[in-house]
Image (tube, rainbow, N blue to C red):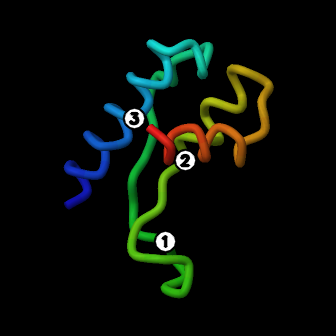
Amino acid sequence: MREKLQKILHESFKQAFQKGLIAAEPADFLVERPKVESHGDYSSNIAFELAKLTKEKPFKLAQILIDH
């Protein structure tokens, strides 16, 4: 399941990048089970990694990925 989620996130990123909505590509990002069970089944740091590179807010980047 983790690999499937990584692939979905990568495809979402690729589409947003091609449309010019995200200006940089993260080198690596994680998909993992959160330590606190109430935080969901899986989590990813892709929005935070992108935020470091683009100086955009992580929430905005996460929303772009969700929309694509």
Q: CA distance from mark 3 to mark 2?
A: 14 Å
x, y percent for residue 36: 55, 82
Q: Earlier in the sequence, mark 2 or mark 1?
A: 1
x, y percent for residue 21: 60, 21
- 32 sits to left or right of 58: left
Indicate which label's residue lies in the foreground, 3 or 2.
3
> For the residue carrying disc 3, how many other residues have a C-alpha within 10 Å: few (<14), some (14-19), or many (20+)?
some
Residue bearing the label numbered 2: 45
Regarding mark 3 in the picture, which secondary structure is present there? helix
Regarding mark 1 in the picture, which secondary structure is present there? loop
Q: Earlier in the sequence, mark 1 or mark 3?
A: 3
- 11 sits to left or right of 48: left
Q: Earlier in the sequence, mark 3 or mark 2?
A: 3
Q: CA distance from mark 1 to mark 3?
A: 21 Å
Q: Nearer the viewer, residue 14 or 37?
A: 14
Residue bearing the label numbered 3: 12
Q: CA distance from mark 2 to mark 1?
A: 11 Å
x, y percent for residue 1: 20, 61
